[in-house]
């Protein structure tokens, strides 16, 4: 039996102590969600921009009166509601996530890796509020968009300093409800803009950072997250305390195989980012749970894009109803109810880099369609149509960009009158 405990508590002033026994999560030595379909699984929500700020000019173009403290307090106010719906943990970040516009300077680090107290004060408020509500924090350190500005980390030494200072801060504060995500999607192409990017984006670099965190605080639970395809590299799996996967570009029919591939490591499997919404998101949640993985909702348009709204279960009624049902002892999942219309962009993945003039093959999966109705699929790049095809389960569309830049792909299903029925989550790529 393997027992791992997070935190090195100086004072007995925390309610929630997170630990792992074999491949299950425990709070205060009690298995989470006992007697329910999510027993031992960490059910979570991505709220990385609940501590957002922008010290650059971009946000001022949208809102001159933006107050980071107001945003943080608005999230904290809703933590009890999220927790009561069955959420066990929140992912927050010291460098945030995509806010819906480019160029934000949003980081808890100075360029040398030292910590900014003003930013950490907001993070600490969230950690303590989560603790009061018997929930955990997945604290993410490095996010690919935070580069090329006055506060950007300057290379390997400053990245190592940032990690060391973050772990020391967690240890000195005595947080017992915090686990660590070193990098968000460490293979994301955006990290190529960072100094020493080849090291940072390699499995060797991530293992080095994980091991440094464990050396500084052996009791801290540490991992890093993979890309949206639900895969996790063997070297990372062996170095991590738990396996952090993302399902953004994974179709529902592949969840079972992706999760089963990771069970051989005998560690908790946690998806902490999936951007499927509504009935599709509820199905994704249930399918992940049925196969033994915790699941993390990412309400991109509401929670992560400016103006960062936190409405509790009203963020997504279908998803939070499923959270509530699955955390209820004795609840049984009806597999037939999970066959929701679903379209996903399986390739490329977020952050893939292509060269101008290169033909890009875009792979789509379209599941559980009603063959009795006529409809077609429109592919958008930055909200402009670039291709259209009739219905099919597996689709391949080729496209050649004519200008460099960042492109957001989205697939939209329309009926024969042109009315939109549903659409995929966005996938962003980089064309150089």
Image (tube, grey):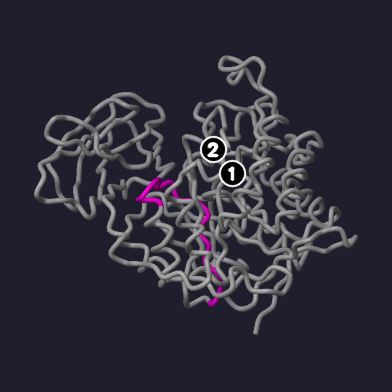
Labels 2 and 1: the sequence-earlier one = 1
Rounded to the nearest angstrom, the CA distance separating label 2 from label 1 is 6 Å
Q: On screen, 49 above or below 271? A: above
**Percent of width and height locating residue 121:** 79, 39
x and y percent of residue 322 in the render? Answer: 45, 57
Mark 1 sits on what residue?
Answer: 47
Q: Please rate how many residues cluster around mark 1, counting C-alpha atoms within 10 Å: few if below 14, some from 14 to 19, many from 20.
A: many
| Quadrant in which the N terminus appears | bottom right
Q: Nearer the viewer, residue 77 or 305?
A: 77
For the point 28% across and 29% down, which residue is it? 401
Q: Is residue 6 magenta?
A: no
Assign a secondary structure to mark 1. Answer: loop
Residue at left offset 57%, top offset 71%: 40
Q: Quadrant of the C terminus?
A: top left
Give yes or no for residue 276 being in the magenta stretch: yes
Kindly identify which residue carries mark 2.
303
Numbered range of the magenta stretch = 266-281
- Picture residue at 33% right of the left edge, 36% below the top: 409
Say few, some or many: other residues with alpha carbon within 10 Å of mark 2 (under 14 / 14 to 19 / 20 or more): many
- Residue 193 placement: quadrant: top right
Question: On the image, which quarter does residue 115 sit in?
Answer: top right
| Contact? badges 2 and 1 (CB < 8 Å) | yes
User: Element at badge 2?
Assistant: helix
């Amino acid at each position: 039996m393997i027992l791992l405990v997070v935190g090195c508590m100086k004072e007995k002033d925390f309610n929630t102590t997170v630990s792992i026994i074999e491949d299950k999560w425990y709070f205060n030595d009690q298995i989470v969600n006992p007697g329910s379909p999510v027993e031992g699984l960490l059910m979570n929500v991505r709220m990385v921009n609940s501590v957002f700020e922008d010290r650059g000019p971009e946000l001022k173009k949208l809102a001159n009166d933006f107050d980071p403290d107001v945003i943080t307090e608005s999230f904290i106010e809703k933590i009890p509601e999220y927790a009561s719906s069955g959420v066990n943990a929140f992912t927050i970040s010291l460098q945030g996530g995509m806010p819906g516009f480019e160029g934000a300077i949003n980081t808890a680090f100075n360029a040398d890796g030292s910590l900014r107290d003003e930013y950490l004060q907001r993070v600490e408020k969230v950690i303590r509020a989560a603790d009061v509500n018997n929930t955990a924090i997945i604290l993410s350190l490095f996010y690919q968009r935070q580069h090329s500005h006055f506060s950007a980390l300057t290379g390997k030494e400053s990245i190592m300093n940032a990690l060391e200072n973050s772990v020391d801060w967690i240890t000195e504060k005595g947080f017992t409800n915090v686990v660590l995500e070193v990098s968000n999607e460490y293979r994301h192409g955006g990290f190529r803009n960072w100094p020493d990017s080849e090291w940072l984006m390699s499995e060797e670099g991530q293992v080095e950072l994980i091991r440094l965190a464990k050396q500084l605080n052996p009791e801290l639970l540490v991992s890093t997250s993979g890309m949206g395809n639900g895969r996790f590299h063997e070297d990372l799996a062996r170095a991590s305390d738990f396996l952090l996967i993302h399902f953004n570009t994974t179709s529902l029919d592949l969840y079972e195989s992706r999760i089963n591939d990771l069970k051989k490591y005998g560690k908790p499997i946690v998806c902490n980012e999936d951007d499927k919404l509504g009935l599709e998101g509820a199905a994704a949640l249930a399918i992940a749970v049925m196969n033994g993985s915790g699941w993390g909702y990412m309400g991109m348009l509401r929670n992560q894009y400016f103006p960062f709204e936190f409405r509790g279960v009203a963020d997504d009624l279908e998803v939070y109803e499923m959270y509530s049902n699955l955390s209820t002892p004795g609840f049984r999942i009806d597999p037939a109810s999970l066959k929701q219309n679903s379209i996903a962009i399986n390739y490329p993945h977020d952050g893939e880099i292509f060269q101008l003039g290169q033909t890009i093959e875009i792979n789509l999966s379209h599941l559980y369609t009603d063959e009795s109705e006529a409809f077609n699929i429109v592919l958008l790049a930055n909200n402009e149509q670039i291709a259209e095809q009739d219905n099919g389960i597996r689709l391949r569309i080729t496209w050649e960009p004519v200008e460099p830049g960042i492109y957001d792909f989205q697939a939209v299903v329309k009926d024969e009158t042109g009315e939109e029925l549903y659409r995929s989550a966005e996938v962003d790529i980089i064309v150089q």
